[in-house]
Amino acid sequence: KRRYLTRLLVGYWIMGGGSYILQKLLPLDHGHYGLANNIFGTLFISVLMMLGIYLIQNGHQDHNKKQLWLGISIIVGELLWSILTVLVFFSPNLMLRQGAAVASMIFPGIMITEGGPLFIALAILLYLFKENRVGQVASILLIGLTATGFNFVGLLTTNIQWMLILSIIPILLYNGARGRSDKWFFYIFYPTHIWLLYILAFALGVTGY
């Protein structure tokens, strides 16, 4: 668990740093368009929350107060960190806002990570229902509906996050067996394809909207 969290955090740093450098070298729409994608932060927080829940459950079952309080501390600590960084982002003090931006690049917060609280909630629900396929499907449908903002306009153009419900198909078809391990491919593919799309947008002179 610790190794996995470390890999995700390092991936977050690499992608965040790479995106920052790319935007400085190739400012899109005169710097008015930002590159915010970094799924590693979302995954890191999700796994951190799962670890907290795991420790709480185990600590409760084994009557291990140390483990129980460690789990609570992990969850509460991340929530407090997320709230603090958001509050500082709205500070009138420029140095504080810049400091919050740097701090969030070092350790991700829920409110400003890709997908935000909704994706974190989805990950937690999927973990809680890991032994219940019906519960997982219901969770995906709930988050998919919530992702529309209960606004059903532009569902095939701009309001598209609801399409995450299509993940139900492979989940229902999954037989529970571990497949071929291609983890390093995805660690490399995700940031690379985002950066290539950004470079293509720059080459085409795409402007923000």
Image (cartoon, rainbow, N blue to C red):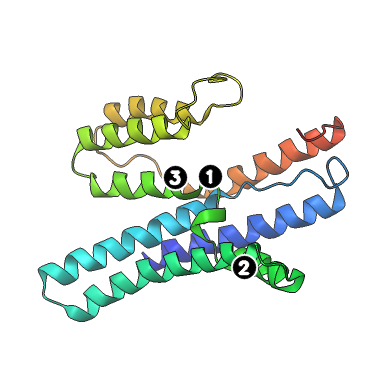
Q: CA distance from mark 3 to mark 1?
A: 19 Å
**Horizontal side of residue 69 vs 78, given as left or right:** left
Q: Which mark sits nearer the N-terminus, 3 or 1?
A: 3
User: Which residue is more in the foreground, 156 or 89?
Assistant: 89
Q: Callout 3: few (<14), some (14-19), or many (20+) C-alpha neighbours within 10 Å? A: some
Q: CA distance from mark 2 to mark 3?
A: 23 Å
**Residue ID for mark 2:** 88
Q: Quick one: quadrant of the N terminus?
A: bottom left
Total marks shown come to 3
Quadrant in which residue 62 is drawn: bottom left
Residue 164: percent from the left, percent from the top? 44, 31
Of badges 2 and 3, the one in the foreground is 2
- Label 3 sits on what residue type? Phe
Of badges 3 and 1, the one in the foreground is 3
Indicate whether 124 appears above or below 70: above
Whether residue 43 appears in this view of the structure is yes
- Label 2 sits on what residue type? Val
**Residue ID for mark 3:** 119
User: Which residue is more in the foreground, 140 or 188?
Assistant: 140
**Residue ID for mark 1:** 186
